[in-house]
Every structure is written in C-alpha cells, then in structure tokens.
Image (cartoon, helix red, strand yellow):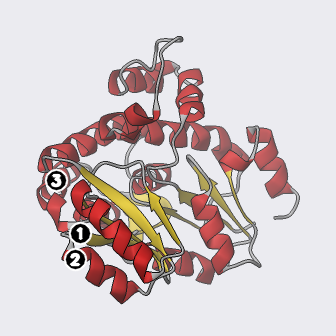
Amino acid sequence: MRLALLFSGQGGQNVAHWQQVQAGIDGELGQAIVRAVPGIAEPLSTVNPEKLAKNKIAQPLIFAQQMLLWGSLQSCLPRPICAAGYSLGEMAACSAAGAFATVEGVALCVERAAEMDGAVSGEYGMLAVLGLDDALVAKLAGEDGLAVAIRNAPRHLVVAGPSAGIAAVAGKFEAAGASRLVHLAVHTPSHTSLLAVAAANFKQRLDLLPDRRLAFPVLSAIDATVARTARPALDALARQICTPLDWAACLQTVREMQPDAVLEIGPGNALAKLFGELAPDIPARACDDFRSIEGIVRWLDAGH
C-alpha cells in the first residue's frame, strides 16, 4: 500500500486531545510532556478552549498527541510515501520522518511557541475565508492591515493579523459574498512577515541539529518542495513561521504521488476533508474519525 500522511495544525484541539495526551504520559516522552505542558499531569486538571488556544499550551500538546498516535501506528503501517504538515503539523511530519527525536520535538515546540509569542505584542488572530476570489480576499485583508497566511484551496484562504483588523474585515468579506467565515483558535499572526524575527531565531536553533537522511520525504507547507534529508526540511520548517503557506499545492503534490490512502494524524479532520474534495477517488480519513488504533489499522487493511 502507498500511504501518505497529513499532520494537522492548531485550531482543532479540544479536551479529548488533552485527555489523550494525559493517558499517554509515560517514560522519557511523558517526562518531556509534563515539563512542556503545565497541568497535564494532574488527573483532575481542567482545561478550557481559551487555554487550549494559547501557543505555549497548544503547540507542545498537539505535537505530543500526534507523535503518541504515530508511535502507536508506525509498526502497524507501511512506510509512508510522503508526509506533509499543516503549519505546526510540519513539526510532527519532520519528527516522524526522523529529522529529530520526539522528545526533542516537544522541547522544540515550546521554543517555537515562545519565539512566536515574543515576536509580537497585542491581540492577533486568524480567519478562514471561503467563497471569494483570492485576489479580492488579499485586497480587502490588506486594507485592514492583514495578510493572506494560507491558501487551502481555490476560494479558501486564511488571513492573519491584528484582532481589530479581523473584526473590521469580517463584515467586508460577508458583504462581498463570502460563503463562510471561520475564526480559528489561534492568537498569533502565523505565516506572515510579522513573525520574521521568530523565524530567524528558530532557524538558529534548528541549525544546531545534524543533517541526516529522512525515512520518507517531507513536503514543505510553503510550496510543496520535497525534502529527502533533514537540512532542507528543517530550513523550510523555520521559514514557514513567517511565510505564507500554499497548502493547496501540498495536497496536489500528494495526489500526484498516487497514494492508495491518505491518513490525517492530529486534532480534527479538516485536512482529510480538503484532500477528499481534491481527490474523491483516493480514500482519506483522519485518526479522529476512529475510536481506536485498531479501527484505523482495520480501515487500511481493508484495502483502502
């Protein structure tokens, strides 16, 4: 079987994912998670959507959840033909392919979040805009100090910038005929030039990691460039913090690699749905669609 992996980003995390990570706390990885995510080791700890949206919580938590899933699945699955990660998910894609160990990845996510939070002050957000031409979205966003951060598909963009600008432009998008607006659970202007300092600082950290052959290719979320060794993958991982993502190009490249099935690992199932819209002939599911690891494996073993 030719299996492609997609690792989701921030926005879909909820209490169930917090509990999944709590249940997986064990050994060296568990210790790293406890250090990275305040309160995760307390069985009766409470968590709300606002807390889960904070970078310092969301980034290491989501990465840990993804890598716990991958750790449970890896021995049951064929070697993937490729992996792509949506925003934060590129951290997990790189780690799963062997660019850095999972334990180190948890610490890197803490550093990534701190760099991003430290690069800007004030209130920021991200807004998904569906149903409008790309050029119009970019024009209206620019008028209110925002920038296009992600292209998910034609007429499906994500803009980012100051919260005041998002509030102002939302009405303009509605008036222009947007079919849907979605405020994402992210409080950072990710993938915009506002985070250039964070990208430069994170690159310095990633430059300390050794180059090595990856177990499978990783696609850059910026432009779908294929990396087969760690160094170009890590360079792209740093650069994407302040660079717009062309996720539509990533999905198209995955499609062209002719997988038999596509599996999304991480919170939510938005990436599997996007791929399904692009390539309805190729089975695509998300781990969150299943109740157990065994269910995921059975679905793949069934010939999908």
Q: Tell me if residue 246 comes above or below residue 89 in the rendering.
A: below
Tag 1: residue type? Leu
Tag 3: residue type? Ala
Depth check: give the residue in front, 80 or 276: 276
Q: Position of residue 61 (x, y in %)?
A: 44, 35
Q: Residue at x 79, y 56 (%)?
A: 300
Q: How many marks?
A: 3
The residue where tag 2 is placed is: 142
Tag 2: residue type? Gly
| Of labels 2 and 3, the one closer to you | 2
Q: How much space separates mark 2 and mark 1, taking CA atoms?
A: 5 Å
Judge left or right: residue 190 versus residue 289.
left
Q: Crowdedness of circle 1 by 10 Å Cα count: few (<14), some, many (20+)?
A: many
First in residue order: circle 3 vs circle 1 = 1
The residue where tag 1 is placed is: 146
Name the quadrant containing residue 244.
bottom left
Q: Are marks 2 and 1 in contact (CB under 8 Å)?
A: yes
Q: Residue at x 59, y 22 (%)?
A: 23
Depth check: give the residue in front, 131 or 223: 131
Q: Position of residue 231 (x, y in %)?
A: 29, 62
The residue where tag 3 is placed is: 198
For the question of whether residue 231 can be seen, the reply is: no
